[in-house]
């Protein structure tokens, strides 16, 4: 299969390698194991299934999009110890420290798209781009994620906010979040999505069951009950709660980074 790059099987045969070790088979139906057959027919020894779990962790977005036509969705939230993200006035710069904000740059670099809400654009006017110089590669070599703004009331039309100065920015006025995610895969070839938004947009994705990984940067501070919550969503019964599993916990500067993955339904 020739996509963005030529078939690797042909290159390996041409290089006359004696053995190929493969972590897992490509789920792309256009491939369907044909590369392995080519290698075997050429007399090359092939081992499949080595370090499969590690390889899948490195390719979560690609694998999910090939299997389900939906991207791998990460939701990032910065909060206080009492689960607050901003003061009642909206003031939020900065709850977490510089190390946590630098870590977010890596999340952006992993993402093909960043989804946010119109209220975040109006309030903060963020760039939502990758701008770190500490990623180990030249910033010019890192593809910038596509910014998608949920603008159901079309409040941003004709405005000059930073993200709108990029012609690739997509304004989405539809309420159907699942359709949006599907379209990012089939129309834009995007496999990994990062949500950086306020409590309403973040809550709507969790409420719809569309978040694969929840990443919380928790600062060692308390903002009080009048401050804004992490999520705005409705849960009427305890049985309707959305549960996540803690996958990893680490200290980032003065903050704690918590990685949760969605429980399989």
Image (cartoon, helix red, strand yellow):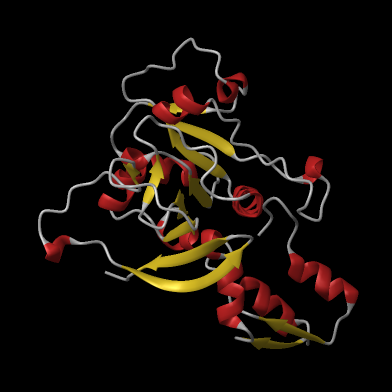
Residue 26 can be seen, yes or no: no
Residue 77 percent across, percent down from the top left: 45, 50
Q: Quadrant of the C terminus?
A: bottom left
Q: Quadrant of the N terminus?
A: bottom right
Relative to 55, 216 lies left or right: left
Q: Residue furthest right?
A: 15
Residue 86 can be seen, yes or no: yes
Determine the residue positioned at 50% across, 73% down: 248
Relative to 133, 16 lies left or right: right
Determine the residue positioned at 82% across, 68% down: 11
Residue 118 in the image: above or below residue 218? above
Residue 253: quadrant of the picture:
bottom right
Q: Nearer the viewer, residue 242 or 183?
A: 242
Residue 94 in the image: above or below residue 118? below
Residue 135: quadrant of the picture:
bottom right
Q: How many marks?
A: 0
Residue 19 in the image: above or below residue 150? below
Determine the residue positioned at 70% across, 50% down: 4
Relative to 61, 38 lies left or right: right
Residue 103 percent across, percent down from the top left: 63, 54
Determine the residue positioned at 18% across, 48% down: 234
Residue 241 percent across, percent down from the top left: 20, 62
Residue 32 percent across, percent down from the top left: 55, 69
Q: Residue furthest left?
A: 237
């Amino acid at each position: 299969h020739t996509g963005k790059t030529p078939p690797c099987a042909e290159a390996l045969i041409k290089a006359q390698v004696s053995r190929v070790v493969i972590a897992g088979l490509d789920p792309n139906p256009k491939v369907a194991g044909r590369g392995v057959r080519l290698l075997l027919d050429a007399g090359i020894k092939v081992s499949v299934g080595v370090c499969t779990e590690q390889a899948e962790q490195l390719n979560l977005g690609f694998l999910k999009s090939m299997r389900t036509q939906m991207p791998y969705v990460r939701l990032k939230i910065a909060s206080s110890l009492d689960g607050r993200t901003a003061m009642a006035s909206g003031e939020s710069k900065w709850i977490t420290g510089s190390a946590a904000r630098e870590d977010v740059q890596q999340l952006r670099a992993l993402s093909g798209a960043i989804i946010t809400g119109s209220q975040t654009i109006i309030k903060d006017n963020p760039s939502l781009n990758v701008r770190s110089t500490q990623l180990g590669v030249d910033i010019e070599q890192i593809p910038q994620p596509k910014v998608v703004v949920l603008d159901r009331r079309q409040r941003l039309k004709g405005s000059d906010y930073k993200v709108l100065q990029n012609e690739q920015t997509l304004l989405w006025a539809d309420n159907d979040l699942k359709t949006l995610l599907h379209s990012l895969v089939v129309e834009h070839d995007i496999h990994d999505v990062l949500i950086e938004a306020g409590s309403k947009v973040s809550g709507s994705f969790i409420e719809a069951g569309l978040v694969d990984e929840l990443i919380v940067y928790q600062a060692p501070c308390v903002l009080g009950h009048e401050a804004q919550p992490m999520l705005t969503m409705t849960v009427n019964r305890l049985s309707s709660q959305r549960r996540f599993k803690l996958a990893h916990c680490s200290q980032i500067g003065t903050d704690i980074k918590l990685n949760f993955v969605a429980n399989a339904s």
